[in-house]
Image (cartoon, grey):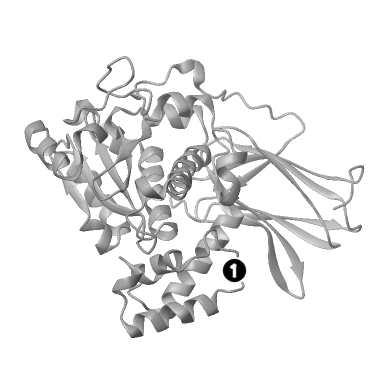
């Protein structure tokens, strides 16, 4: 959508949204950025503002604004997570190829935390936005138009193992929800190619998490290469499309798969797998029943001390949070988040700026059948610099 297409009522709503969120630190301050949120919520001011504010909280919590500079991906992701940028389509949309079917999702999630995999995907999206802003002549149709991305989702190699491995399926669905909540109108079109019959199972699981507008942007093709190559070439100039997908773009050495831009995925070597023999020395054991949560309270008598944690689980992930009690209220200090502490130990610390009771929470309420056993060490350290 273009700013020039707005009617008087829509322009007024845009002006109202700008006034309503003037206290927010936005990653982009122009009207086109605000337009994304209005289009996503059909110019409902209240819903657009709520969506935008929720996303700004998410960005702050996950330090998204500096992710392209400050966060370094684990090597296993850069080598085996087959997602990358290849060019631009005829609409000047940034193009990303994801060889989903070729990826060993189970191996990736045994070699890196789910949070790292999600962060890696966020970094790719943020880098695409940054690249578009740096090169508007190539990736933005006009200064008043919302810039978007086109995704080629190659499902060659996709099978039931991609669906039956629950951690992988959960990760995919979480990525989908994250995109819907934080990158409105980011997607122009999704070409799903080489989709086997079992893909319909995954798509039926994903559809409830997709906005109707997003579903309309999805174009699904089976293994009929002639058909999907023709469809791609309607949207792409040949020199912008990898040769393996019907274009003429290759690597410098002539490789038609453009592996310098998007790796081929493949099975993750077990040498990358994270160790599972966790040390329980000096740790306490805390059973957390399915559908329940456990809380540990610590008294902080001096401002500026550090509360430090180190824990792991034997059976699966757990939601972790820290609160500070104040006037009968539980004030979040470390926001509630599910962590893959069964993959590797979760460690961290906070500086307690205020005295009082701090509550460490292990929440398993999301699990209907599986109880968890948490091994934890919580310490209070006073020999560190104050906040």
The vertical placement of 2 against 251, above or below, is: below
Taking the spot 59% from the left edge, 32% from the top edge, the residue there is: 344
Nearest the eye: 32 or 49: 32
Q: Secondary structure at mark 1?
A: loop
Nearest the eye: 240 or 194: 240
Taking the spot 92% from the left edge, 42% from the top edge, the residue there is: 383
Q: Quadrant of residue 293?
A: bottom right
The location of residue 89, given as percent across then percent down, is 26, 44
Would residue 217 be seen by someone viewing this image from the given angle?
yes
Q: Quadrant of residue 339?
A: top right
Residue 231 vs residue 296: left or right? left
Nearest the eye: 227 or 114: 227
The vertical placement of 42 against 178, above or below, is: below
Taking the spot 32% from the left edge, 37% from the top edge, the residue there is: 87
The image quadrant where one finds the N terminus is bottom left
Q: Which residue is disc 1 drawn over? A: 24
Q: Quadrant of residue 84?
A: top left
């Amino acid at each position: 959508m273009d700013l020039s297409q707005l009617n008087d009522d829509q322009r007024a709503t845009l002006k109202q949204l700008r006034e309503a969120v003037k206290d927010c630190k936005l990653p982009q301050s122009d009207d086109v950025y605000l337009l994304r949120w209005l289009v996503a919520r059909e110019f409902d001011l209240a819903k657009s503002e709520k969506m935008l504010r929720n996303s700004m909280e998410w960005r702050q919590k996950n330090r998204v604004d500096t992710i392209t500079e400050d966060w370094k991906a684990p090597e296993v992701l850069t080598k085996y997570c087959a997602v990358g940028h290849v060019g631009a389509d005829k609409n000047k949309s940034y193009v990303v190829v994801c060889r989903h079917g070729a990826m060993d999702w189970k191996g990736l999630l045994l070699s890196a935390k789910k949070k790292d995999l999600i962060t890696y995907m966020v970094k790719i999206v943020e880098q695409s936005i940054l690249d578009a802003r740096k090169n508007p002549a190539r990736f933005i149709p006009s200064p008043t138009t919302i810039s978007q991305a086109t995704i080629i989702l190659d499902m060659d190699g996709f099978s039931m193992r991609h669906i039956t491995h629950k951690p992988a399926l959960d990760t995919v669905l979480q990525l989908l929800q994250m995109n819907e909540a934080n990158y409105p109108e980011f997607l122009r079109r999704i070409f799903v190619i080489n989709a086997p019959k079992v893909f319909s199972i995954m798509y039926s699981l994903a559809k409830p998490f997709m906005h109707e507008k997003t579903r309309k942007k999805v174009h699904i093709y089976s293994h009929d290469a002639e058909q999907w190559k023709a469809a791609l070439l309607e949207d792409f100039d040949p020199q912008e499309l990898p040769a393996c997908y019907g274009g003429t773009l290759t690597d410098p050495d002539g490789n038609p798969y453009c592996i310098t831009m998007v790796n081929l995925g493949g099975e993750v070597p077990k040498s990358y797998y994270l160790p599972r023999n966790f040390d329980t020395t000096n740790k306490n054991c805390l059973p957390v029943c399915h559908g329940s949560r456990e809380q540990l309270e610590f008294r902080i008598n001096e401002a500026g001390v550090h509360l430090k944690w180190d824990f792991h689980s034997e059976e699966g992930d757990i939601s972790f949070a820290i609160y500070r009690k104040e006037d009968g209220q539980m004030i979040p200090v470390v926001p509630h988040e599910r962590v893959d502490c069964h993959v590797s130990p979760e460690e961290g610390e906070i500086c307690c700026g205020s005295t009082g009771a701090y509550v460490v929470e292990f929440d398993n309420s999301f699990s209907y059948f599986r109880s968890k056993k948490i091994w934890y060490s919580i310490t209070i350290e006073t020999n560190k610099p104050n906040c």
